[in-house]
Image: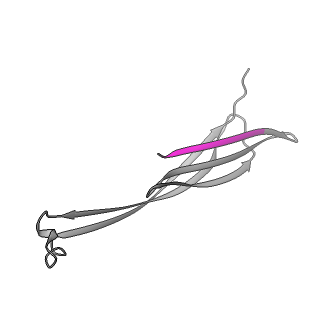
Amino acid sequence: FAGLKLKAKLELFETKLKLLLENELTHPVENLIRGNKSSTEFFPKLGKYMQAFQVKYKLNSVGQQKIPGLSDVPLLKHLFTSTSRQATAQWLIGYVRITRSE
């Protein structure tokens, strides 16, 4: 399971709008669910899109290929087995736009 949890609070600060934003991105890591948490506050402009947050997460994967039978022979298993590792990093970027409802 992977998910994004957002918690936002919009308030009036003097004459400007202030947005308090907490985010948590979770994803599976081995047999656990882990994730990054962050919080930010900024002053959005009414009707304009603004970047609210960005979260970087890394994924690591390991794969193994073998030839049945030959990879089970102790002296030959290294010749007929291959292991690959791959690491990727991705960014999730969120934008907000504050509008007035009438």
Which quadrant does the C terminus fall into? top right
Residue 89 is a magenta residue: no
Residue 5 is a magenta residue: yes
Q: Among all residues in the image, which is located at the extreme bottom?
A: 75
* Quadrant hosting residue 13: top right
Q: Is residue 60 left or right of residue 16?
A: left
Instruction: Give coordinates of residue 21: x percent, y percent.
Output: 69, 46
Q: Give the range drawn in magenta.
A: 2-10
Give the color scheme: rainbow, by chain, secondary structure or one colour: one colour
Q: Which of 23 and 41 is in front in this view?
A: 23
Q: Is residue 44 left or right of residue 65?
A: right
Q: Residue at x 11, y 65 (%)?
A: 69
Q: Residue at x 69, y 30 (%)?
A: 99
Q: Among all residues in the image, which is located at the extreme left?
A: 69
* Quadrant hosting residue 12: top right
Q: Which residue is drawn at 33% across and 66% down?
A: 85
